[in-house]
Amino acid sequence: MSKPVVAIPADIREIEGNVWHATPNQYVRAAVKGADVLVFLVPALETGNDVDGILDHVDGLLVSGSRTNVHPSLYGREATEADGPFDRARDATSLPLIRRALERGIPLLAICRGIQELNVALGGTLANEIHEQPGMWDHRKPDTPVLDEAYGIRQKVIVREGTCLASVLGAGDIQVNSLHRQAISRAAPNLAVEAVAEDGTIEAVSVIGAKAFAVGVQWHPEYWVGSDQPSNRLFAAFGDAVRAYAAAKQAVAQRSAAE
Ligand SMILES: N[C@@H](CCC(=O)NCCCC(=O)O)C(=O)O
């Protein structure tokens, strides 16, 4: 059996005067090296997405981070200039993919913007510029041109006992990186909070009653896959879930062919 396939919804980026569908290499590298899967990038389309047509060809969904923010209109709020930058095509592509992947039992790992999209897709809300709130830590991307510094491990997160994440990483404290201005404000009804920062920021969730692995994290495990044990374990667990889904799908196809 060939390796299973994971879809990564792309961002819209303007590069050298042209519009690109793009995702940073760190997500592709982590999926290939950490989860041992093949990767398909999904173009970001504001309309015309064939969600089932895409998901028919994949065994997992990896929703990446991005400097852009989910549009507030998607969680019932008026958008202001301060809520940007936006990527409406990304929103229109990833939110339906998240909802439908969960319905079909396709494994999901959502990272940073991805956990925020997961929350909004299921009916939750987001808070912006969280560092401006009293008692909140500054979770923003460090102001440095050096990526290893920007993604440096610098924050404690407490993984709760008895959670999906605890089964992968163990319960208790882990050290993670942090590059976000927004965070989950009201968690969607069917999301379980799995990890929090010391200032109460929700750092990880899982989907209650999910048919398969369905986890979102606010930090960036993809960046240190290969050298950081929690990152390695999370992507290995995601890869195992993707392989299980692919094997089950192939077994169904073989039974149908034999009938
Ligand atoms: N825009 C959201 C999500 C942040 C995120 O995904 N960060 C990763 C990319 C960082 C970068 O390249 O700037 C938020 O700010 O909360």
Image (tube, rainbow, N blue to C red):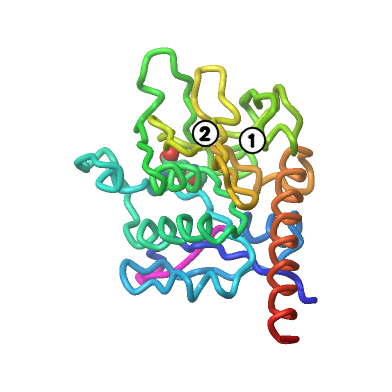
Residue at screen point 52% across, 34% down: 142
On the image, the x and y values in percent for residue 195 come to: 60, 28
Residue type of the residue flagged with mark 2: Pro
In the picture, which quadrant includes the N terminus?
A: bottom right
Can you identify the residue that label 1 sits on? 152
Within 10 Å of disc 1 (Cα), the crowding (few <14, some 14-19, many 20+) is some
Q: In the image shown, does 151 or 1 lie closer to the viewer?
A: 1
Q: Which residues are magenta?
A: 16-24
- The residue most toward the front is 259
Q: Residue at x 69, y 28 (%)?
A: 162
Q: Secondary structure at mark 1?
A: loop
Q: Determine the image quadrant of residue 89.
A: bottom left
Q: Is mark 2 within 8 Å of ligand 1?
A: no
Q: Are marks 2 and 1 in contact (CB under 8 Å)?
A: yes
Q: Is residue 150 left or right of residue 167?
A: left
Give the amino acid type for the residue marked by disc 1 in the picture. Answer: Gly
According to the picture, the residue beneath numbered tag 2 turns out to be: 142
Q: Position of residue 205 (x, y in %)?
A: 55, 36
